[in-house]
Image (spheres, coloured by chain):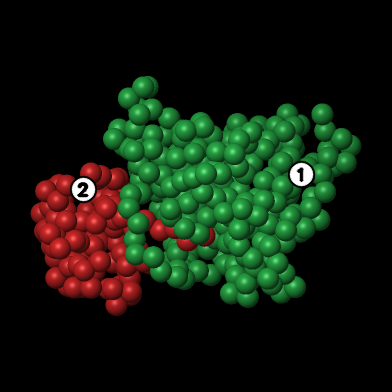
Amino acid sequence: MSIKVMISAYLQRFTNHTEVVEVNGSTVGECLKHLGEQFPLVKERLFDRQGKLLIHFNIYVNEKSVYPHNPDKPVRDGDEIRIVTTIGGG
Amino acid sequence: MLTTDELERYDRQIMIRGLGEEGQEKLKRAKVIIAGSGGLGCPASMYLAAAGVGTIRIVDHDRVELSNLNRQVLHWDKDISRSKVDSAAEKLSQLNQGVKIEPMEETINEANISQLVAGFDLIVDAMDNLPTRYLLNKAAIDKNIPFFHGAVYGFEGRAMTIIPGKTACLRCVYRGLPPEEKFPVIGVAPAVIGCIQATEVIKYIVGIGKLLTNRLLVYNGLNLKFTELMVKRDPNCEHCGHLAKEG
């Protein structure tokens, strides 16, 4: 199963500037875990020590918010996960 | 009532269906506060002044630095070390003498925010930091003032319009604070987003078009792509959740 994770500019420095990462998994949590396995620096940025997604990241699947973050939310082949970082620059 | 000069100055926009002289008069009566005179605040204030928004209050505590000049286009080499709001007010007044510009050299904080926004119809979020954005969002919700959010990072930008009690607020969408750091930015990114904020302000005042509500617009300048993310009001939002319960 192939899911795409869209990486925002804020996180691209931790993915060797890759914008779209293909991951495998049947849930959002599994996909983010696979992303973290491919890019350990992203994992350090996204999750706290207990493995919980930090609150300044929001997850969207196919452009719809999945807040509150539910790692068990199922995803299907072809879905796009977007990690949106809270940004404040102006 | 518009003057002869105003009818000529705004002739091309008065021609727009749904705007007309009535819309132009609404713009003339409108009072907009722009929080920040940086990368976003410069283009937003320029286009609102050019469009004839009657009163524009600009709040910023910073002084112009050389490193601002790649994006903060109201501030020029000659303005370095000058108050940003004075620098902006000078140029905006020259752009449109018919608009009242109120420069306020203040740091927005919990103690003064209520007074700063009092009497204003709309708030433009053109800040450069999240804590003040959250403060503005809360004040907008509490005072029932429409709030126009914009933010940038590198070539990316975000924008969203918030109608208190009716649409998702900034706090419904964003929580927490990422580690503080100097953010990268090139002037064209806040130019795009600041103009989107100004577009939304004009639409709201005139009462035309479809506002950017319950949609977080994500602009990717490198791929030249706009993506809309669907957002919803959070019934437990610490800023606007009580309004959902009341509603």
Q: Chain of mark 1?
A: B
Q: Residues within 10 Å of mark 1 (few under 14, many from 20)?
A: some
Cα separation, mark 1 vs mark 2, equals: 46 Å
Residues at marks 1 and 2, common chain? no
The quarter of the image holding the N terminus of chain A is bottom left
Q: Residue at x 29, y 61 (%)?
A: A6
Q: Colour of chain B?
A: green
Closest to the observer, B191 or B226:
B191
Residue type, mark 2 in image = His
Disc number placed over residue B100 in the picture, else none: 1
| Residue B88 falls left or right of residue B203 | right
Closest to the observer, B125 or B19:
B125
Q: Which circle, 1 or 2, is nearer the viewer?
A: 1
Does residue B172 sit above or below B80 in this rendering?
A: above
* Residue B18 appears in view: yes
Q: Residue at x 45, y 68 (%)?
A: B183
Residue type, mark 1 in image = Lys
Disc number placed over residue A69 in the picture, else none: 2
Residue B241 image offset from top left, x and y in percent: 34, 32
Closest to the observer, A64 or B128:
B128
Q: Colour of chain A?
A: red
Does residue A4 sit above or below B15 in this rendering?
A: below
Q: Chain of mark 2?
A: A
Furthest residue to the bottom?
A16
Q: Residue at x 39, y 65 (%)?
A: B180
Residue B15 image offset from top left, x and y in percent: 74, 38
